[in-house]
């Protein structure tokens, strides 16, 4: 592994399946993570930074793995740390308009429950 880390396996763009994407986002925590990652920043597993303080780190890691295996995110391993970002360009290429529709749905859901994903990546 080099100084920049190692990218974990993920599906090629052509292999991202809509059913797997939708299944992965069927969980409210993963939908929230999706909305957070959509800021374009790269995030680590810190549940505090993600606004998921009530979840154990292993649970957050599980959700991150599900998102990566569905093709929604890319994960870079640097030592014991994992850094995640949304594969926005790949998703827009594979399913034009899907990301925007999902973000609108996530925002509606958050409005309904009175919780907002942080908009400031430092946040």
Image (cartoon, grey):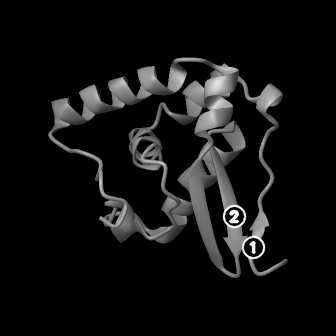
Residue behind mark 2: 76
Residue beneath the point at 69% across and 38% down: 71
Q: Earlier in the sequence, mark 2 or mark 1?
A: 1
**Contact between labelled residues 1 and 2, with CB atoms less than 8 Å apart:** yes
Taking the view exactly as shown, the residue that stands out farthest to the left is 114
Residue beneath the point at 18% across and 36% down: 113
For the C terminus, the image quarter is bottom left
Rendered position, 86 above or below 18: below
User: Is residue 24 left or right of 47 when viewed as pictured?
Assistant: right
Q: Position of residue 95 (x, y in %)?
A: 63, 19
Residue behind mark 1: 5
> Please, what secondary structure does the residue beneath circle 2 have?
strand
User: Is residue 16 left or right of 52 when viewed as pictured?
Assistant: right
Residue beneath the point at 51% across and 67% down: 45
Q: Position of residue 88 (x, y in %)?
A: 58, 37
For the N terminus, the image quarter is bottom right
């Amino acid at each position: 592994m080099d100084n920049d880390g190692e990218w974990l396996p993920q599906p090629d763009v052509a292999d991202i399946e809509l059913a797997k994407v939708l299944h992965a986002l069927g969980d409210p925590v993963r939908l929230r993570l999706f909305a957070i990652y959509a800021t374009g920043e790269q995030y680590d597993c810190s549940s505090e930074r993600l606004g998921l303080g009530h979840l154990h780190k292993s649970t957050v890691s599980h959700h991150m793995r599900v998102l990566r295996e569905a093709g929604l995110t890319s994960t870079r391993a640097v030592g014991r740390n994992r850094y995640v970002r949304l594969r926005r360009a790949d998703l827009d290429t594979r399913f034009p308009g899907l990301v925007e529709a999902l973000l609108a749905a996530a925002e509606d859901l958050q409005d309904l429950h009175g919780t907002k994903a942080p908009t400031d990546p430092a946040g």
